[in-house]
Image (cartoon, helix red, strand yellow):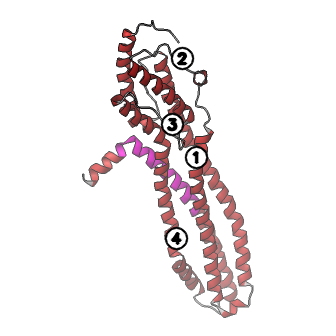
């Protein structure tokens, strides 16, 4: 497969677009904060140069050029590292997307495998899973699997009240907590890189100033240290804004997948109640289409099997 055909297939996949969007969003948030910090640092560095040049300009000709050349040479590795972290965050966004879609993937795989093996039991997972969907899946697939094995109807089975009272995506604290832990790691790495960049830069400024003997005995070092303390008062609000941004992104991503999970849950519940034409059609949730196709195929096959079982069942159907 050549590069052109690969890129065409990649960008035409809704799942790939979902991963790409989340990766770009997270990396954009990181780069935005980093670029803001760098801009403020650049302004303060220019003020430093102006300050030193106005006082010691005659004593140290070519001071600005030497100052910038030194900082650039010392900071180039750190700049590469900061940029590389953004790339890592981009790919981490794709990994997070995989985690968010993991519950749908598990159900889709189970649907395919259970068609070949009616005795297969649906097992809930504790890591990254919607509790209401996994619990209902355990009930739903268990009842249908039992009916297929025993050749009986499911019309006499009642849905537990805990599932009939769900009419909107419920708040899943466990899923959100596990997802937030992953996002917290990204925030921690971002904050660490921002603080590291600031500390390293000012250490290099002090090191450069100390190379000039006439500046060692002056108040130049104290001035830079005080300036660093002032700049930290700018950094921490930016880190806080980064945290808020990550929380907003997390809430948005969680709302997207929880809405899709509720749509699948509602379809399964409707199917179990007797609406055998119920299928998963989620408008605006194209990123799970690859999985919902397999779910719908499973429902197609179950519709045929259950209608045959109900036709042969000696017990008259009961409405739920």
Which residue corresponds to the image point at 67% horizontal and 56% vertical from the top-left? 240
Q: Circle 4 sits on which residue?
A: 79
Q: Which residues are magenta?
A: 11-34
Q: Circle 2 sits on which residue?
A: 158
Which residue corresponds to the image point at 41% horizontal and 15% vertical from the top-left? 152
Instruction: Look at the numbered discs 1 and 2 and tell me whether their residues touch, using CB distance below 8 Å.
Output: no
Residue 195 position, x and y percent, is: 63, 67
Which residue corresponds to the image point at 42% horizontal and 25% vertical from the top-left? 145
- Assign a secondary structure to mark 2: loop
Q: For marks 4 and 2, give the one nearer the viewer.
A: 2
Q: Which mark is residue 178?
A: 1
Q: Which of the marked residues, 1 or 2, is nearer the chain's N terminus?
A: 2
Q: Circle 3 sits on which residue?
A: 124
- The secondary structure that most of the magenta stretch takes on is helix
- Assign a secondary structure to mark 4: helix
Q: For marks 1 and 4, give the one nearer the viewer.
A: 1
State the CA–CA distance, disc 1 to disc 2: 32 Å
């Amino acid at each position: 497969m050549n590069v052109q055909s690969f890129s065409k297939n990649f960008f035409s996949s809704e799942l790939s677009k979902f991963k790409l969007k989340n990766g770009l969003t997270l990396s954009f948030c990181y780069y935005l904060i980093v670029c803001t910090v760098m801009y403020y640092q650049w302004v303060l560095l220019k003020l430093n140069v102006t300050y030193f040049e106005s006082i010691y300009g005659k004593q140290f000709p070519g001071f600005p050029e030497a100052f910038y050349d030194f900082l650039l040479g010392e900071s180039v590795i750190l700049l590469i590292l900061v940029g590389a972290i953004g790339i890592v965050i981009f790919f981490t966004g794709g990994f997070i997307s995989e985690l968010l879609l993991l519950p749908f993937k598990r159900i889709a795989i189970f649907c395919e495998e259970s068609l070949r093996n009616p005795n297969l039991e649906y097992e809930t997972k504790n890591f990254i899973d919607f509790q209401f969907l996994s619990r209902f899946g355990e009930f739903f697939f268990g009842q249908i699997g039992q009916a297929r094995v025993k050749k009986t109807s499911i019309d006499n089975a009642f849905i537990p009240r805990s599932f009939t009272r769900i009419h909107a995506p419920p708040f899943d604290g466990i899923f959100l907590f596990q997802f937030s832990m992953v996002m917290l790691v990204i925030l921690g790495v971002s904050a660490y890189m921002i603080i590291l960049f600031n500390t390293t830069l000012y250490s290099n400024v002090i090191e450069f100033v100390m190379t000039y003997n006439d500046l060692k005995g002056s108040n130049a070092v104290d001035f830079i240290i005080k300036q660093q303390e002032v700049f930290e008062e700018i950094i921490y609000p930016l880190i806080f804004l980064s945290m808020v941004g990550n929380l907003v992104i997390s809430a948005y991503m969680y709302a997207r997948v929880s809405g899709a999970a509720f749509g699948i849950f509602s379809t399964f519940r409707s199917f179990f109640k007797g609406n055998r034409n119920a299928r998963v059609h989620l408008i605006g949730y194209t990123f799970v289409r690859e999985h919902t196709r397999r779910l719908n195929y499973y429902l197609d096959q179950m519709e045929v099997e259950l209608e045959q079982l109900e036709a042969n069942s000696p017990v008259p159907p009961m409405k739920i």
